[in-house]
Image: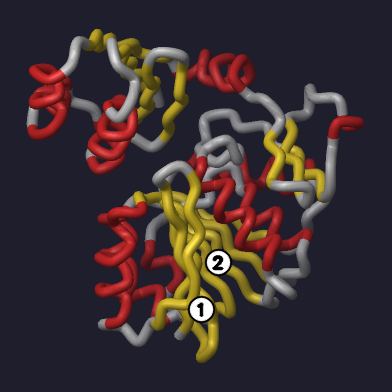
Amino acid sequence: MDRIKVTYIFSELEPWNEVVIAALSELGFDSFVEIESGIEAYINENEFDTDLLDVGILKEIQELVQLHVSIEKIPFQNWNAVWESDFKPVFVEDKLTIIAPFHDPSIVVGLPIIIQPQMSFGTGHHQTTWMMSKILLDMSKVPTKVLDMGTGTGVLAIISEKLGAENVLAIDIEPWSVENTIENAERNNCKNIISKCGDIDLIKGHNFDLILANINKNILKSHLEDYSSAMNQGAKLALSGFFETDVDELISEATKFGLKFDSLVTKETWAAIILIK
């Protein structure tokens, strides 16, 4: 599937870059790259409508600050080249390094994870993936049965197995993400990851000790009841894909389904929370 890249260039970067990222993430944009004078935002072509950029806060911003907006279609076959040109090694403190196959392995600090992104989201560059990786690394022991919902490249599923998970279910609605997860699992010699294409209904009949979901706020809210139903007593649910300003709303919604707030991680206005059943 082709992708759409929308580039915003601001006369004043702060705070408009964060405002636009927040607004676009609510509209289904799933990847963001911060550049010198603005941001690049990515979305699947079939989910994009130019009218999205001319409503609400995105319209108001046009009257508050000088900006330039450009829209570019990225053909399917060029997506790998776009990612590869931007893919720098990712260091999660001194505990983990996410590299691509073309990187020099001598730069690795801590646990090495090799990811070829292809068209999938989740290389570790985005703050949300970084925080979810940190959550896993900070656990005294990653439990046996793990769900990685919206797996993207499979990076969180791979980290989970490397840290001790024995049964990992990785789900994504995009077929290429499922294929990418399978390939990346093989690159990292993972044997315990099952990758499936589909949505939340795929978890029915399963029970997990840990659920990882790095998606967006609205989808997370709609999934909370299903997550809770699939969690063993005492299991943890780690959520990200939203901003610090959304934390209270998600915690309030989660309590309706027997989930109790445990802890919070933040990075550059983004947030991740851990809930316990």
**Kind of residue at disc 2:** Leu
Residue at x 52% of width, y 63% of height: 212
Snapshot colouring: secondary structure
For mark 1, give the secondary structure. loop
**Residue 239 quadrant:** bottom left
**Residue 24 quadrant:** top left
**Camera-side residue of 219 and 190:** 219
Classify residue 140 as left or right of residue 124.
Answer: right
Label ID, residue 139: none
Q: Which residue is mark 2?
A: 147
The location of residue 17, given as percent across then percent down, is 33, 27
Residue at x 33% of width, y 11% of height: 72
Residue at x 71% of width, y 40% of height: 91
Q: CA distance from mark 2 to mark 1?
A: 9 Å
**Camera-side residue of 275 and 118:** 275
Label ID, residue 206: 1
Callout 2: 10 Å neighbours few (<14), some, many (20+)? many
User: Relative to 58, does residue 147 appear above or below in the rendering?
Assistant: below
For mark 2, give the secondary structure. strand
**Kind of residue at disc 1:** His
Query: Are circles 2 and 1 on residues that touch, CB within 8 Å?
Result: yes
User: Relative to 123, does residue 129 appear above or below in the rendering?
Assistant: below
Q: In the picture, which quadrant includes the C terminus?
A: bottom left
The location of residue 79, given as percent across then percent down, is 51, 19
Callout 1: 10 Å neighbours few (<14), some, many (20+)? few
The location of residue 232, given as percent across then percent down, is 52, 87
Q: In the picture, which quadrant includes the N terminus?
A: top left
User: Relative to 197, does residue 117 appear above or below in the rendering?
Assistant: above
Residue at x 54% of width, y 16% of height: 82
Q: Nearer the viewer, mark 2 or mark 1?
A: 2
The location of residue 188, given as percent across then percent down, is 79, 46
